[in-house]
Image (cartoon, helix red, strand yellow):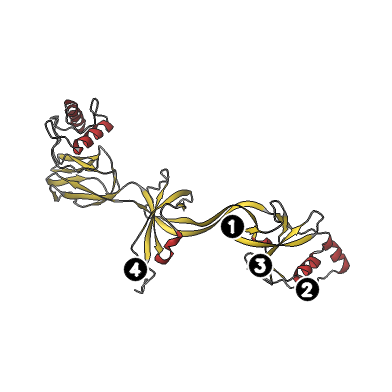
Amino acid sequence: MSGNKRRLALIGLGVIVVAGIGAVAIGITDQPGGEAAAAATATTAPATAAIERRSLAVTEELTGALDYDGQLSLVGNLRGTVTRTAEIGSVLEAGDIAYEVDGKQRATVMIGARPAWRSLESGVANGADIRQLEQNLKDLGYGAGVKVDGRWTDATTKAVKRWQKARGLTRDGVVELGEVVFLTEPMRVTERAVEPGFGSGPGSVVMKGTSTRQVVSLDLDADRQDIVAVGDVVAVTMPDGSEVPGTVAEIGRVATATEDAFGQAGTPTVEVVVTLAEDATAADLDGAPVTVVVTRSERPSVLAVPVNALLALLEGGYAVEVVDADGSTRLLGVEVGVFDDGWVEVTGEGLDEGLPVVVPS
């Protein structure tokens, strides 16, 4: 069937050809060229695309920013004038010096949930603080022979002396209160609460920071928070263009009111926190914008056609124009589902994978 005759037949059937997703009616006009042009057109087969089996998804892009999870404070127990502290942006891990007072006394970071609250030495009562110390001494390579059980033994004293020797401290086997500060995890320093030259004492917050776990934070309109749920897997496009998987870890329970540049009330938002895969890091890009792609619905392994293969019927619904083996064409009614990246899910009687359908050339 020639191009003009085929289009006339479609119009006669009450069809509006879909261009993209919007429906556009096609008018028919006389074509110049006479019989020769008609003969040439008659030999031209319509452009086709095969029905494919695909996985389609409805996604939405949200804008977020790189951030670090958790707020931490380093509480010291040394008394004196602060003469040195860790730099902002540095990461304090087990064995690092957090700060110094009076040019000589230094507080060493160790990892543990129990804050330091007493001096530790032979004869002290068993406790979780001893267990933490023993574990750190072993992790740092000084704990040969130490059993991590919260009991102070001769092996514990020897391990402490090895650590003191390596740090240039008096080798007395005693950990004075303040010489060790326990953090629940490594801390990325964001603020020095006490600057060098100022005094510090027992119980003083010397510096503040965050964990080293990089996350994405974003403000989501409160009335749209149903598009994500805790545990959802999302895709995060990093500032360098790479894409890494993420997981929705937190959704705020309290909406925050916003204001525009003119002081007018904006849409209330809730904070959403997305954790990143362990191997995804962008350490020098704190605060950099990222794109979070949320999958709102997904249809695995469905029949799909290019969107421009759809024909919108005047009486309602959609059809595709199928090309049979002999070159003839016919319309098949279809139900449409998910649209994704130029393709649309279709269902209907007579549809099959590989079946050719007409598309605009």
Helix, strand or loop at label 2? It is loop
Task: Identify the mark nearer the N-term, 1 or 3.
Answer: 3
User: Pointer 4: residues within 10 angstroms few (<14), some, or many (20+)?
Assistant: few
| Total numbered circles | 4
Label 1–label 4 contact, CB within 8 A: no
Residue located beneath label 1 in the image: 341
Q: Quadrant of the C terminus?
A: bottom right
Spot the residue most to the front.
349
Up-down: is 17 above or below 167? below
- Which residue lies at the image location 23% right of the left edge and 25% below the top edge? 145
Q: In the picture, residue 173 is in which quadrant?
A: top left
Task: Identify the mark nearer the N-term, 3 or 4.
Answer: 4
Helix, strand or loop at label 1? It is loop
Mark 2: amino acid: Thr
Task: Identify the mark nearer the N-term, 1 or 2.
Answer: 2
Disc 1/disc 4 C-alpha distance (Å): 35 Å
Q: Residue 189's x, y, as percent?
A: 27, 48
Residue located beneath label 3 in the image: 317
Between disc 3 and disc 2, the foreground one is 3
Between disc 3 and disc 4, the foreground one is 3
